[in-house]
Image (tube, helix red, strand yellow):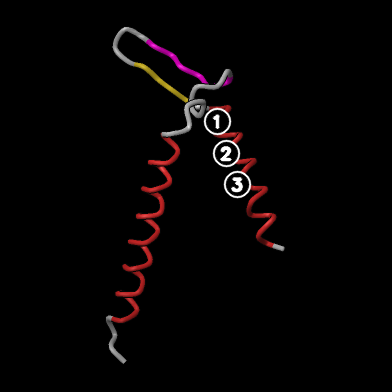
Amino acid sequence: MNPWSGLAKLLILFGLILSLWGGLLVLLQKIPWLGRMPGDLFFKGEKFSIYFPLTSCIIISIVLTLLFALFKR
């Protein structure tokens, strides 16, 4: 058995995960209300701005928790 086959499989897996993650990010940009909800925090100073999508993160977390619980069964 080739000692590099394990590394090759791992690199292919990481490539697939990155591809799926990139596709998910593209799809999430199409959702107009995501990131602009009432609980999302945005602070703007003279030389900086900070944006933290608190409510959006909570909603995504709840949805993912429900999906994982559904597929676990």
Q: Position of residue 2 (x, y in %)?
A: 28, 88
Q: Magenta part of the protein: which range?
A: 39-44
Q: Are marks 1 and 3 in contact (CB under 8 Å)?
A: no
Q: 40 left or right of 45? A: right
Which residue is the site of mark 2? 60
Q: Is the residue 37 above or below the residue 45 in the image?
A: below
**Which residue: 69% across, 54% down?**
69
Q: Earlier in the sequence, mark 1 or mark 3?
A: 1
* Residue type, label 3: Leu
Q: In the rendered structure, which amino acid carries the disc numbered 1?
A: Ser
Q: Which residue is at the far right?
A: 73
Residue 44: quarter of image = top left
User: Is residue 67 or residue 48 the one in the foreground?
Assistant: 67
Q: CA distance from mark 1 to mark 3?
A: 12 Å
> Dots 1 and 2: beta carbons under 8 Å?
yes
Where is residue 41 drawn, in percent x and y?
Answer: 51, 19
Which secondary structure dominates the residues rendered in magenta? strand
* Residue 56 within the segment the image draws in magenta: no
What element does badge 3 sit on? Answer: helix
- Vertical comparison of 1 with 46: above or below: below
Q: Which residue is mark 1?
A: 56
C-alpha distance separating marks 3 and 2: 6 Å
29 vs 8, nearest the viewer: 29
Instruction: Report the front residue among 23 and 3.
Output: 23
Residue at 68% x, 62% y: name it.
Answer: 72
Residue occupied by mark 3: 64
Residue lying at 31% horizontally and 7% vertically, measured from the top left: 46
Q: Position of residue 38 (x, y in %)?
A: 58, 18
